[in-house]
């Protein structure tokens, strides 16, 4: 869950920098149901015990296709290009390895994750992985909060979240160009 | 003029969707 925590922290840097998050209320996403559908599919394939690999792998890739359609529908929002880049990096690694995110053995050990899998595992150490540098090659070590593995694509997506929140909220920030408040104009004139 | 409650709920909805995108793209395989 380190990626989720990092994304929330990235969004919270907006109010911490003195800018209100209120303008986010004006955002209208198109096709947001696709994202929830993708999550639903991923929860099923990762949480269901002994979920078969032959079904889990194509469903895993399908969930990325759903996310990709959502990204395309919302391509005009700020930062979505970065989301697309991060998602593309993860998708490339998963697609190149038959539907599984290849993890670095060192990162996997460092995070203290189990070495054996029961049923479908959407990220695991893959022997002779393709595009290993796009896989889960980094780790929050065991013993640290939210110890786990993550990829370059994950980091790009987290950055994109922060970029989106900052760019959108600053777009509606009152600027100096609009002139001083009426009360101040009265004082200075 | 939108109420603070309305704005707050809308902001939470947007943030939830943003987090959902992060989960859909990057996080689920970390649910070990």
Image (cartoon, helix red, strand yellow):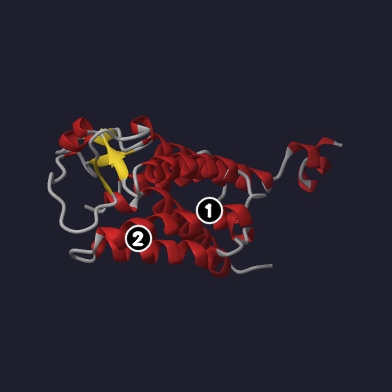
Q: Residues within 10 Å of mark 2 (few under 14, many from 20)?
A: many
Residue located at (39% from left, 62% from top): A39
Q: Pointers 1 and 2 in contact (CB under 8 A)?
A: no
Q: CA distance from mark 1 to mark 2?
A: 15 Å
The C terminus of chain A: image quadrant = top right
Label 1 is found on which chain of the structure?
A: A
Estimate the x, y position of residue B8 in percent, counting from the top left.
Answer: 52, 63
Estimate the x, y position of residue B9 in percent, counting from the top left.
Answer: 51, 67
Estimate the x, y position of residue A74 in percent, counting from the top left.
Answer: 62, 54
Up the image or down, A28 lies above or below A109; here it is below
**Nearest to the observer: residue A27 or residue A116:** A116
Up the image or down, A79 lies above or below A64; here it is above
Q: Is residue A175 visible?
A: yes
Checking the image for residue A42, the label placed there is: 2
Residue located at (68% from left, 48% from top): A172
**Nearest to the observer: residue A59 or residue A13:** A59
Up the image or down, A109 lies above or below A119; here it is above
Task: Report whether A2 appears left or right of A9.
Answer: left
Q: Is residue A18 visible?
A: no
Q: Quadrant of residue A63?
A: bottom left
Residue under label 1, please give it.
A68
Q: Earlier in the sequence, mark 1 or mark 2?
A: 2
Up the image or down, B7 lies above or below A139; here it is below
Q: Residues within 10 Å of mark 1 (few under 14, many from 20)?
A: many
Label 2 is found on which chain of the structure?
A: A
Checking the image for residue A128, the label placed there is: none
**Nearest to the observer: residue A78 or residue A25:** A78
Q: Secondary structure at mark 1?
A: helix
Q: Secondary structure at mark 2?
A: helix
């Amino acid at each position: 869950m380190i990626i989720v925590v990092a994304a929330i922290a990235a969004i919270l840097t907006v109010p911490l920098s003195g800018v209100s998050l209120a303008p986010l209320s004006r955002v209208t996403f198109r096709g947001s149901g696709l994202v929830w559908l993708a999550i639903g599919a991923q929860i099923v394939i990762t949480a269901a015990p002994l979920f078969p690999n032959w079904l889990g792998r194509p469903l895993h890739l399908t969930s990325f296709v759903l996310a990709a359609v959502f990204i395309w529908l919302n391509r005009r929002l700020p930062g979505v290009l970065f989301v697309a880049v991060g998602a593309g990096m993860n998708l490339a690694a998963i697609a190149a390895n038959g539907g599984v995110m290849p993890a670095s053995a060192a990162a996997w050990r460092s995070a203290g994750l189990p070495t054996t899998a029961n049923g479908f595992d959407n990220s695991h150490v893959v022997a002779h992985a393709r595009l290993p540098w796009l896989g889960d090659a980094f780790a929050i070590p065991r013993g640290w909060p939210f110890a786990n593995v993550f990829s370059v694509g994950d980091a790009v997506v987290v950055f994109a979240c922060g970029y989106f929140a900052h760019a959108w909220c600053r777009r509606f920030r009152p600027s100096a160009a609009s002139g001083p408040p009426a009360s101040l104009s009265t004082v200075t004139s | 003029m939108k109420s603070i409650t309305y704005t707050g709920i809308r902001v939470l909805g947007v943030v939830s969707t943003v987090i959902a995108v992060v989960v859909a793209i990057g996080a689920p395989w970390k649910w070990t």
